[in-house]
Image (cartoon, rainbow, N blue to C red):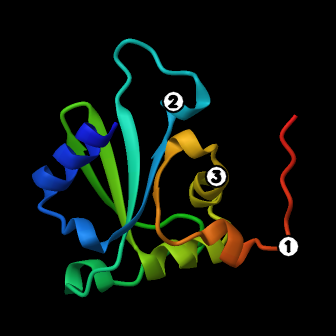
Amino acid sequence: MEATVSAIIKELKLNDEQITNIYNYGSWVYGTNHLKSDRDFLFVIKDSRKKYQKRLKFHKDFDYFHSFELHRLKDWDVTIHSCANFELLLEKNYMLVVECIFYPDEFILRNKIDYKTTIYRNITIHYD
């Protein structure tokens, strides 16, 4: 998986040092993938460029929906959020980002900021 992440970083011209968290999500995580399934990744970055500092804009009538940055590369879909926007989505209990921080370790490819501990520190998850 490291080779895939490196290829994505190179293709999107991201600064590896500014990437705090990387999550694999979607059908490969849920076990519903098939031969033609792509891989879905969510990157969280600390980046001072204006492009990544824009606050998410939510729809008036239903603030769960928002626009976001999605890159379709080869067999990968890559979503990128700034740390601030990722935290905003956690505050709104946006299911995808909440799921990401509670995934098993094999799907958390980088975890420089431990959002599970910092935001949900009083919740204990028991796996049977």
Q: Residues within 10 Å of mark 3 (few under 14, many from 20)?
A: some
Judge from the rendering whether residue 18 lies leftward or rightward of residue 15; answer left or right.
Answer: right
Q: Residue at coordinates 83% horizontally, 53% vertically from top-left?
A: 125
Q: Which labelled disc corresponds to residue 99?
A: 3
Residue at numbered disc 2: 27
Mark 1 highlights which residue?
A: 122
Q: Are marks 3 and 2 in contact (CB under 8 Å)?
A: no
Residue at (51, 30) in percent of width and height:
27
Q: Position of residue 86 (x, y in %)?
A: 50, 72
What amino acid does circle 1 point to? Asn
**Image position, residue 120 (x, y; %):** 75, 71
x and y percentages locating residue 1 in the rendered image:
34, 36
Q: Residue at x 33, y 84 (%)?
A: 54
Q: Is residue 46 above or below residue 1?
A: below
Q: Which label's residue is closer to the chain start, 2 or 1?
A: 2
Between 6 and 119, the one lying in front of the other is 6
